[in-house]
Amino acid sequence: MEFKQIVADLSINSDNMKVHQKEKMISQLRLFMLDEDRSIQHNAVLALGRLVEHSEELARIVVKKDILHQLIWSIPSQPHHYKKATVFVLHAVAKHSPELSQAVVDSGGLDILVSCLGAVDPEVKEAAAWALAYIAQQNTMLSQAVVDAGAASLLLSLHTNDLDREEVNTGTIALLKQMIRSPDVKLKRQVLFTLIQISKHSVELAEMVIAAYIFPDVMICLQDPDEYVKKDVITLMWEVVKHSAQLSQVIVNCDGLVEVVDYLDKSRGSMRLPGIMMLGYVASHSENLAMAVILSKGLQQLAICLSEEDDDHIKEATVWSIGQIGHHTPEHANAVATAGLLPKLLQFYTGASSLEDLRLKSKKALKNILLKCTHLPSLEPLLSNAPSNILNHVLGQFSKVMHHDSEACQEFVMSGGLSKIQEMDAEPGSAQRNLINSIKSCIQEASANPSGKCRILKKFHRQPLCDVPLQVCSSI
């Protein structure tokens, strides 16, 4: 018993032990598993599971020493608490890699785990379900092996439509709907996890989930105190909306956007990721859905996420979602621009510390938004530090808008924009030089009046009509 306690303490940080010490410890536990006293057997198995759960290296040692066969062979004759501990060891080994999951299968683990699903004790059932789920999620071949072994319909494949459809056809969704309001947190997590796996592969499967009218019950789970239950609800929405505008509209009609924005406001770190992705997928499908995201304050919440989160993966997802919102029309792009997000996107694109994926996503989002943006005051900050490939898009938008908006020309001169573009060292005949000349031409045309005097400089100097000739004004 003292040895078991030492193992439990060491399992918290097994890095403190050298390899030969770990092997020696596992060999000692194996001897205790053969002890005549059942309490010593049980404690040895429990200690082994705790060690293996934290270390793939230890899991490989267990396989190497052929301990799996010993455990599996002993299960049928043991009481329920020993079965639960043994199944926990199989789960702890299988979770680390496809190779180790295959070792559990090769040792006859699948048949034992499936038989444990029919055990009277609910804790043994739950432990077996977890172990089978870890095996099934590793790859398609192992997932098919779980199905072939006769695992219950709640253990769904993560990999192919055919496997999912086989399970759904057994009436899984109807069963899940009955259990979604269960007060058992672990059960709710598993139910939602299963719905996520059904929905993720195809429009057809996602439509089956929607057709079961399951979302009113799912939305109630957002009030659950368990953070992972709420995260699973948001992830389920994400997996549904990604397939089509029609499915996205169903979730929007269920107040899905409002709930996701509220969830993002209350969450932090990686918990935010499914909500960020959900908003991006909804916005990607159509102008109307993107505007619904904006009106629900989704864009505002994404801006908050971008300012609060340091993880590059969350930044990448947020930048992608912002790009999906802003690329549709000038109205959408201007919403992104007036939220002050363009300088942030430029910072990620040009920043030396940004990962390559973040740089690429920022570049794409920035380019697509700039091609539609007509809010010139939001574009002016980019004139000072944008690289030439981005600067050309910015100058192009100034030229387009100012060509038919004389007030925009006046504001550009008064804000110092004209001075900025005159300082640019653009080569003669280059695209950038042509755009600069086009903007100057727009200013000159906007400045013209019957007397040949400059209206812009009148407003700029806040004095009577200026006497500066047009040819001089246009060269300023």
Image: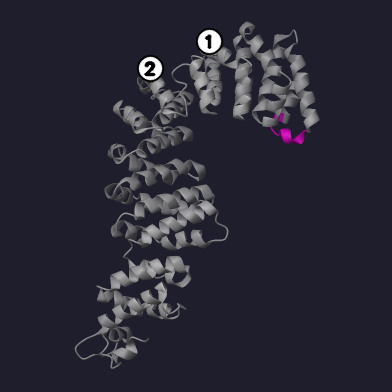
Task: Determine the secondary structure under disc 2.
Answer: loop
What is the residue that sits farthest to the top in this orientation? Answer: 77
Which residue is identified by label 1?
119
Q: Is residue 259 above or below residue 74?
A: below
Image spot of residue 61 (x, y percent): 72, 25
Q: Which residues are magenta?
A: 11-17
Image spot of residue 293 (x, y percent): 33, 48
Can residue 214 be seen in the rendering of this structure? no
| Front residue (pair 29, 362) | 362
**CA neighbours of label 1 inside 10 A, class few (<14), some (14 to 19), many (20+):** some
Three-letter code, disc 2: Thr
Image spot of residue 33 (x, y percent): 72, 14
Can residue 154 be seen in the rendering of this structure? yes
Task: Determine the secondary structure under disc 1.
Answer: loop
Quadrant assignment, res 240: top left
| Front residue (pair 229, 213) | 213
Q: Is residue 275 above or below residue 372?
A: above
Question: Is 15 inside the magenta-drawn segment?
Answer: yes
Q: Going from the N terminus, do you reach mark 1 or mark 2 first?
A: 1
Which residue is identified by label 2?
170
| Front residue (pair 21, 72) | 72
Q: Quadrant of the N terminus?
A: top right
The residue drawn where x is 71% and y is 18% is 66
What is the residue that sits farthest to the front in this orientation? Answer: 429
Q: CA distance from mark 1 to mark 2?
A: 21 Å
| Front residue (pair 284, 259) | 284
- Front of the two marks 1 and 2: 2
Three-letter code, disc 1: Ala
The residue drawn where x is 32% and y is 30% is 207
Quadrant assignment, res 194: top left
The residue drawn where x is 76% and y is 35% is 16
